[in-house]
Image (cartoon, rainbow, N blue to C red):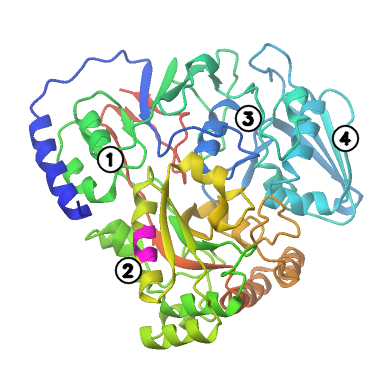
Amino acid sequence: MKRRQLLQSTAATAAVVLGRPAIAQPPRVLRYVPQADLTNPDPVWSTATIAYIHGYLIWDQLYSLDEGLIARPQMVVGEQVEDDGLTWRLTLRDGLVFHDDVPVRAQDCVASILRAGKRGNALQALMDVTNEVKALDDRRIEFRLKKRFVLLPFALSGVFIMPERIAKTDAFTQISEYVGSGPYRFMRDDWKPGSGAAYARNEKYVPRPEPISMWAGGKVANFDRIEWKTIPDPATQSAALQRNEVDWVEAPLIDLTPMLRKVPGVEVEVFDKLGSLMLMAFNFYHPPFDNVKLRRAVLSAINQQDFVNSVVGEQQNLGRVGVGVFPLASPYSTTAGMEALTGPRDLDKSKRLVAESGYKGEPIVLMVPSDQPNLVQEDQVANALFQSLGLNVQYTELDWGTMLRRRNNKEMPDKGGWTSYCTAWVGQSVASPLVHLPLRTNGKATQAWWRPTDATFEQLRDQWLEATDLAAQRKICDQIQLRVFEEVPFIPLGQWFQPTAFRNDLSGFANSPFPVFWGVRRT
């Protein structure tokens, strides 16, 4: 069944659903449908957004980013900067306690920093210039740096603070215990992959006194329990929301949102102001995409409007084209080299480039996350594009969790490996060279072994960190984008802005690239 036909049948079903009575729900329980099933709950091991949504519920951070992407103190009550910026001493605020009633110590923070520093993008940059990070006592952390790093608070904002015993787990091994000090506790016994998860309010959590601003400020938990319900089918999600069987659907299928806007008792809003950057990823470890000439041939055939249309349909206000390496709202967005994406498309010329690349018909395993509708739509366009170029593409559907595990498989594509996939990164995670993980190579971001080794990207990133003003940083971003269109480590496919849908008795949502639950309340 084609997508538009499916939506027509869904709308017809919804019209019947509207007549059903609402189901009463206790005001202290929030029923939430996440974008994907929670299969990998370790936000250090996994780059999946669902792991970060889970992480922000149960773990706290030393610093957190506000709506302006400025790092604000969270677990930190004060900081001292000495020796011309080479020594930083951070002091933890009072009353920080893990869910197992053990006080949070500086030693826990150091262990968490060291583990995350082996995987996190911004934190790796900090660790590269750090001589030593240690606990001076139970409440004070000291950084001794090789050179000044004014973005230290920003880099630490991505660290989830875990007990030392958990944080000592190897960074490339998933943790098996989920104890934090955040506003909610993970109910491990209620977690059933494929079904859902649950979280209980941490009664001992003491919020900061400041107003909420994205991930910063007072994380006030207004619900005793949050229940995640995994519902892969978009039509079933929407029907459950209309019947008041769930309170909040994180990522309804965009084509269904006009209908949802008309449903009494349902609101549809966009809380993500940066949008999601759509990308086509390649595996450089095996043929055929270890060949830069073939990657350039694919780039020459990309029409961003096709990919954006596949996700947003007629709601063009939710999509953007003419998008390069950085989201359009980022101060580092640039037009340098954009003719590679915006110039005239000539399929015959692109097919000639494929032939000239020496492509020998090797299979291209295109991984498609069947439970991520927006990504499925991207991959359908990619599949058609590969076919039009004469590539031997194998459209391979997997659930999101299985796809993430397969991404770590180094075998040849015909032996359980993979070749390409389409994805989307929340805008904040690709807004600058410091945090842009797709720009990292397999030299430093060793979790991404499938990426190329290109010292130029690392050198430009280091220069960006050394730049003294925004103008200088922007010039470096011009060079980065030009290099991307030359080496094609990935291909930008455009942007979309994902609406979220919820019952209209909920309020207090933070403007955030993905859902956070503090501040949300039922009126």
Q: What residue type is labelled 3?
A: Asp
Give the label on residue 306, or none.
Answer: 2
Q: Nearer the viewer, residue 453 or 209?
A: 453
Disc 4 to disc 2, how far (Cα)? 51 Å
Disc 1 to disc 4, how far (Cα)? 48 Å
* Mark 3 in CB contact with mark 2 (< 8 angstroms): no
Q: Which residue is drawn at 69% across and 52% down?
A: 122
Could you tell whether 476 is left or right of 88 in the image? left
Which badge, 4 or 2, comes first in the chain's sequence?
4
Q: Tag 4's secondary structure? A: strand
- Quadrant of the rendered image containing residue 507: top left
Q: What residue type is labelled 2?
A: Asp
Disc 3 to disc 1, how far (Cα)? 32 Å
- Quadrant of the rendered image containing residue 173: top right
Q: Name the residue under label 1.
A: 234
Q: Tag 3's secondary structure? A: loop
Disc 3 to disc 2, how far (Cα)? 40 Å
Q: Which of marks 3 and 2 is in front?
A: 2
Q: Name the residue under label 3.
A: 60
